[in-house]
């Protein structure tokens, strides 16, 4: 029950952030540079993934409907979903400029970003070992039937930019709500701890794990935010990059099918390069304070 409530609260937060991002776009508080790079990149990657996954899609066709109709519907639907997801994530990413109220022009402290990410990953690993143990996350095999099994699709890439954008948005919204932590500070703390609690309890299946992970997760999120993230939201690219790459490392180690290792390495490099570029090289943040 608590897990479902936590997931529902996160969905509401994401919807609110998406609406705010669209409003920021309409007001011109928007980075079209980030929007274009993320949108075009996700579209290209997604379109290639659709073409690459055609053997599996063709295998699922039935004799109930005309083949030509199924082909048209499949291609149209896939391209529409890729374009829509790329557009939404690009809008959220482009709105990062409007969240920014504290970024300095100093060098990005990437060590702090890595430290926070590893702390979260370590905590999640420890929680998965507590009884009752969580079910193992089995590697997926859906890429095995593709033309090129090492091309991993676009879900991880979309998840990376989506997660980074949501985290930056939350940093910006709480900073604006508290007027850079000068007013309504207590409410800001409560909001941070509530989000940290909801993030951590999703997926847990016992009261003990929900209580322990929720409380510690809330405190860890509050500490991460106050000590690191609120000072430079560019670290969000690094933190989410570590999260995504850690999942790819699991797939690379298990190597469930031919090409899984190469695909994990390839996508890991893409995410690492993206994290480096948007954290250190993106000019949209230059000069903001």
Image (cartoon, rainbow, N blue to C red):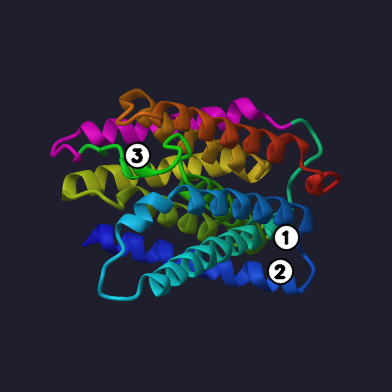
- Mark closest to the chain's N terminus, 2 or 1: 2
Q: Can the viewer see residue 211 in this picture?
A: yes
CA–CA distance in space, label 2 to label 1: 7 Å
Q: Quadrant of residue 31?
A: bottom right
Instruction: Label 1: state its secondary structure.
Output: helix
Alpha carbon separation for disc pair 2 and 3: 41 Å
Say whether disc 1 or disc 3 marks the residue closer to the N-terminus: 1
User: Marks 1/3: CA distance?
Assistant: 41 Å
Number of residues whose C-alpha sits closer than 10 Å to that of mark 3, classed few (under 14), some (14–19) or many (20 or more): some
Q: Which one is in front in this view, the residue at disc 2 or the one at disc 3?
A: 3
**What residue do we see at 18% from left, 50% from top?**
205
Q: Which residue is mark 3?
A: 144
Q: In the rendered image of this protein, does residue 95 appear above or below residue 237?
A: below
Q: Verify CB contact (< 8 Å) between mark 2 and mark 1.
A: yes
Residue 7 location (% of width, % of height): 34, 60
Estimate the x, y position of residue 133 in percent, counting from the top left: 16, 37
- Label placed on residue 61: none
Q: Nearer the viewer, mark 1 or mark 3?
A: 3
Specify the label residue 24 is tagged with: 2
Tell me which label, 2 or 3, sits earlier in the chain.
2
Q: Which residues are magenta?
A: 108-135
Label placed on residue 98:
1
Most foreground residue, 18 or 218: 18
Magenta-drawn stretch contains 46? no
Tell me the residue at 27%/67% (across/down): 62
Residue at 26% from the left image edge and 39% from the top image edge = 137
């Amino acid at each position: 029950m608590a897990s479902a409530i936590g997931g529902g609260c996160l969905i509401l937060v994401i919807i609110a952030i998406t609406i705010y991002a669209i409003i920021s776009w309409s007001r011109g508080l928007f980075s079209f540079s980030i929007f274009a790079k993320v949108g075009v990149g996700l579209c290209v990657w997604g379109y290639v993934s659709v073409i690459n996954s055609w053997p599996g899609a063709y295998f699922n066709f039935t004799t109930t409907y005309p083949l030509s109709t199924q082909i048209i519907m499949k291609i149209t639907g896939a391209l529409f979903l890729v374009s829509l997801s790329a557009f939404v994530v690009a809008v959220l990413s482009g709105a990062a400029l409007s969240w920014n109220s504290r970024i300095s022009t100093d060098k990005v402290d990437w060590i702090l970003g890595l430290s926070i990410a590893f702390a979260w990953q370590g905590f999640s690993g420890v929680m998965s070992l507590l009884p009752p143990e969580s079910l193992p996350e089995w590697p997926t095999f859906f890429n095995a039937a593709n033309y090129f099994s090492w091309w991993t699709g676009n879900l991880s890439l979309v998840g990376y930019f989506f997660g980074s954008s949501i985290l930056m948005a939350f940093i910006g919204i709480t900073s604006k709500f508290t007027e850079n932590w000068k007013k309504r500070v207590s409410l800001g703390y409560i909001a941070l701890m509530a989000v940290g609690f909801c993030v951590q309890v999703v997926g847990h299946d016992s009261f003990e794990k929900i209580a322990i992970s929720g409380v510690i997760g809330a405190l860890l999120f509050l500490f991460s935010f106050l000590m690191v993230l609120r000072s430079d939201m560019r670290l969000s690219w690094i933190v989410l990059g570590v999260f995504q790459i850690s999942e790819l490392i699991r797939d690379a180690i298990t190597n469930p099918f031919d090409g899984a290792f190469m695909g994990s390495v390839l996508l890991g490099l893409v995410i690492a390069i993206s994290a480096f570029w948007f954290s250190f090289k993106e000019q949209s943040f230059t000069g903001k304070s």
